[in-house]
Image (spheres, helix red, strand yellow):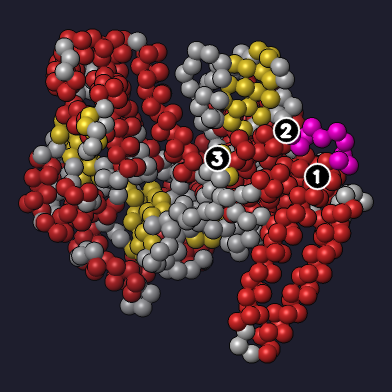
């Protein structure tokens, strides 16, 4: 997908005013400067959803969602960033350049066939590299460490992508595949700098992903470099692949004709299980099990045994998947399928457990899997039990009544009520009544569910921010990326999100100054803020984004900036919440000169204090210098710094 020009984004934000965009979905009432309505993203009875026409943004004070018109469409229509730009473009008459032309049906079928052939060709290439005496060394070493024998490796078609940006591209070009076909396969990316295609998988152990007929439709790759993140990459949805519909190893598992399917999280687990003789195992690809995957499973079996990761994310995924499945099963009463949840002892993953304890012990783990109702009873208890305080009956009651209300089967629901009543010391009938009334009252049930979801989501959102590289759409609009090649998503590194009050104010005034910031008669070039003026990573990233989209005639609109705010935190708080208040204050300065003076005042103050920090370290360098040269070097730097500081002070005095 091509780059969307900055001017188009700005034009969309200008024409698609937030009031009319939101007004299509929410009825709004004016109160003070803002408009208010019922939030479309969470269930509520009193309006906590607000629209600020002057800043061109929305914000919900209940669930915390907020942003500009593009973000609103992303959330409400479940579209990606570029998709929602196109959506708004067509509504508001802004032309969005589209690189891809609508292909005819015949043409499309032909291309699909070519892309499938290309993927098979790629698998052969990876396989050859894996077995190459030199190139394949790291991959074979890893396979050996994981005790993967030749037979297993060949069975799953495991390969190796050499550590190169263009090895596969060159190979396929020689084989006569076009750039267009390569792009449609999902295993290449286009560099934003050079516009060239490059290999998505580099230096990774490669797992071909098959459809249930055994055609290769995608790849997963595991890094072989220590510490490289992410550990696993899957090729994205493409012309021939939709991850929501597929299960890894289903093409093998279905041959077993077993009445049971085992579902694990990763390919390594699935492969280890097949090797240990559990050939009825599949892996869910991607983060959560979907209803279309459930439907696929139901075609092949009567019982599904799930293994979820033992960590927090895995446990949360378990509850979400169970809710989805039970809702799905109650809608389709014809679908008779038993759901069980298995637990590997000591928080291990299946692969690890099998290697340590063997296949027989693992067979017991599968056999001991809990029926979904038993699992939910245990979860509600464990989640609300505290060593010191015992069971929190209030929260236990909320959870278990909610879970009970999900059960499509009356008898199972009453069994759950009986068990829960023992814990609560309550009448089983009363517990069952509560479950039934939640099941019948969708509104009340959603309220309870949402209250718990919101609490979880808020915590999750804060955790997910600050990894600016992995946000969809962000790459597309941030033209200030420095990496030579667009980097792969980085999802775990510690981002410093601290900022002082002065830094926050400085940025608010810079934003509020608009085009004045580029007017050298008002603000000297050296007095334009820089990422270096800020101490934390998230502020640095914001300033970088700000400068990259800055327009000398218009500055940057608040709505445009809010695209970036919603991706980071400042001092642990969503950036848009912090900046909203400060920008409102900055906007209310009586005139542009006053505003400019505030801006410069904060800038000088920050730069002086930065100089002070450097001075301190230089002074100690001078004190502990071992040679005369070191001493005079420090001395010289100190003199320069104090001149610089003097200049700052003088400028400050002139304000
Ligand atoms: Zn809300």
Left or right of residue 372, residue 540 in this image: right
Left or right of residue 171, residue 552 in this image: right
Q: Position of residue 120 (x, y in %)?
A: 38, 56
Check the image and report above or below for 65 versus 219.
above
The residue range painted magenta reads: 584-594
Callout 3: helix, strand or loop? strand
The label nearer to you, 2 versus 1, is 1
Tag 1 and tag 3, C-beta contact below 8 Å: no
Closer to the chain start, of discs 1 and 3, is 3
**Location of residue 125 (image quadrant):** bottom left
**Location of residue 67 (image quadrant):** top right
Closer to the chain start, of discs 2 and 1, is 2
Q: Residues within 10 Å of mark 2 (few under 14, many from 20)?
A: some
On whether residue 15 falls in the magenta region, the answer is no
Q: Position of residue 645 (x, y in %)?
A: 79, 64
Left or right of residue 371, residue 285 in this image: right
User: Which residue sits at x=62%, y=22%?
Assistant: 50
Residue identified by numbered label 3: 573
On whether residue 588 falls in the magenta region, the answer is yes
**How far apart are the two marked residues, 2 and 1, measured between alpha carbons?**
14 Å
Q: What main secondary structure does the magenta stretch of the protein show? A: helix
Residue identified by numbered label 2: 584
Check the image and report above or below for 537 versus 635.
above
Q: In this view, which residue lies farthest toward the right? A: 521
């Amino acid at each position: 997908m091509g780059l969307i020009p900055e001017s188009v984004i700005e034009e969309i934000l200008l024409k698609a005013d937030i009031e009319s965009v939101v007004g299509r979905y929410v009825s709004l009432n004016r109160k003070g400067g803002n408009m208010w309505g019922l939030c479309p993203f969470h269930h509520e009875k009193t309006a906590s959803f607000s629209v600020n026409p002057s800043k061109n943004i929305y914000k919900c004070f209940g669930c915390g969602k907020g942003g500009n018109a593009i973000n609103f469409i992303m959330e409400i229509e479940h579209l990606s960033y570029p998709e929602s730009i196109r959506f708004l473009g067509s509504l508001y008459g802004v032309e969005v350049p589209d690189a891809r032309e609508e292909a005819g049906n015949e043409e499309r079928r032909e291309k699909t066939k070519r892309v499938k052939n290309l993927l098979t060709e790629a698998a052969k290439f990876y396989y050859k590299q894996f077995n190459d005496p030199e190139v394949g060394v790291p991959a074979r070493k890893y396979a050996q460490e994981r005790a993967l024998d030749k037979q297993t490796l060949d069975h799953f078609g495991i390969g190796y992508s050499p550590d190169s940006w263009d090895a596969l591209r060159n190979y396929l070009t020689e084989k006569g595949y076009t750039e267009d076909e390569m792009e449609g396969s999902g295993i290449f990316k286009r560099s934003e700098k050079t516009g060239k295609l490059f290999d998505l998988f580099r230096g990774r152990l490669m797992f071909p992903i098959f459809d249930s007929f055994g055609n290769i439709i995608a790849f997963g790759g595991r890094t072989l470099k220590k510490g490289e993140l992410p550990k696993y990459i899957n090729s994205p949805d493409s012309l021939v692949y939709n991850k929501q519909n597929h299960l890894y190893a289903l093409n093998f598992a279905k041959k077993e004709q077993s009445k049971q399917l085992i579902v694990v999280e990763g390919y390594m687990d699935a492969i280890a299980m097949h090797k240990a003789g559990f050939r009825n195992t599949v892996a869910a690809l991607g983060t959560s099990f979907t209803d279309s995957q459930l439907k696929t499973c139901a075609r092949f079996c009567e019982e599904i045994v799930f293994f979820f990761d033992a960590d927090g994310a895995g446990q949360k995924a378990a509850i979400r998947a169970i809710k989805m499945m039970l809702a799905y099963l109650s809608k389709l009463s014809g679908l008779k399928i038993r759901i069980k949840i298995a637990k590997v002892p000591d928080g291990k993953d299946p692969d690890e457990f099998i290697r340590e304890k063997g296949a027989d012990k693992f067979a017991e783990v599968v056999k001991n899997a809990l029926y979904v109702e038993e699992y939910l009873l245990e979860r509600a208890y464990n989640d609300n039990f505290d060593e010191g305080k015992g069971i929190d009956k209030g929260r236990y009651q909320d959870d278990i009544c909610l879970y009970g209300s999900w059960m499509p089967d009356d008898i199972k629901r009453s069994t759950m009520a009986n068990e829960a009543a023992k814990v609560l010391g309550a009448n089983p009938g009363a517990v069952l009544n509560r479950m039934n009334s939640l099941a019948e009252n969708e509104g009340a049930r959603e309220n309870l569910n949402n209250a718990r979801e919101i609490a979880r989501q808020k915590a999750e959102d804060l955790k997910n921010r600050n990894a600016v590289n992995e946000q969809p759409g962000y790459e597309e609009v941030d033209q200030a990326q420095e990496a030579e090649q667009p980097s792969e998503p980085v999802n775990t590194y510690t981002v410093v999100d601290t900022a002082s009050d002065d830094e926050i104010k400085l940025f608010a005034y810079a934003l509020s100054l608009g085009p004045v910031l580029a007017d050298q008669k008002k603000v000297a070039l050296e007095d334009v803020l820089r990422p270096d003026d800020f101490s934390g990573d998230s502020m640095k990233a914001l300033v970088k984004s700000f400068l990259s989209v800055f327009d000398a005639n218009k500055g940057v609109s608040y709505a445009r900036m809010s695209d970036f705010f919603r991706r980071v935190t400042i001092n642990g708080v969503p950036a848009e919440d912090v900046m909203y208040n400060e920008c409102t204050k900055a906007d209310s300065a009586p005139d542009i000169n006053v505003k400019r003076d505030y801006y410069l005042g904060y800038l000088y103050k920050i730069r002086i204090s930065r100089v002070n920090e450097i001075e301190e370290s230089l002074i100690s360098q001078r004190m502990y210098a071992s040679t005369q040269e070191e001493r005079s070097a420090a001395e010289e730097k100190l003199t320069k710094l104090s001149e610089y500081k003097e200049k700052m002070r003088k400028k400050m005095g002139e304000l």
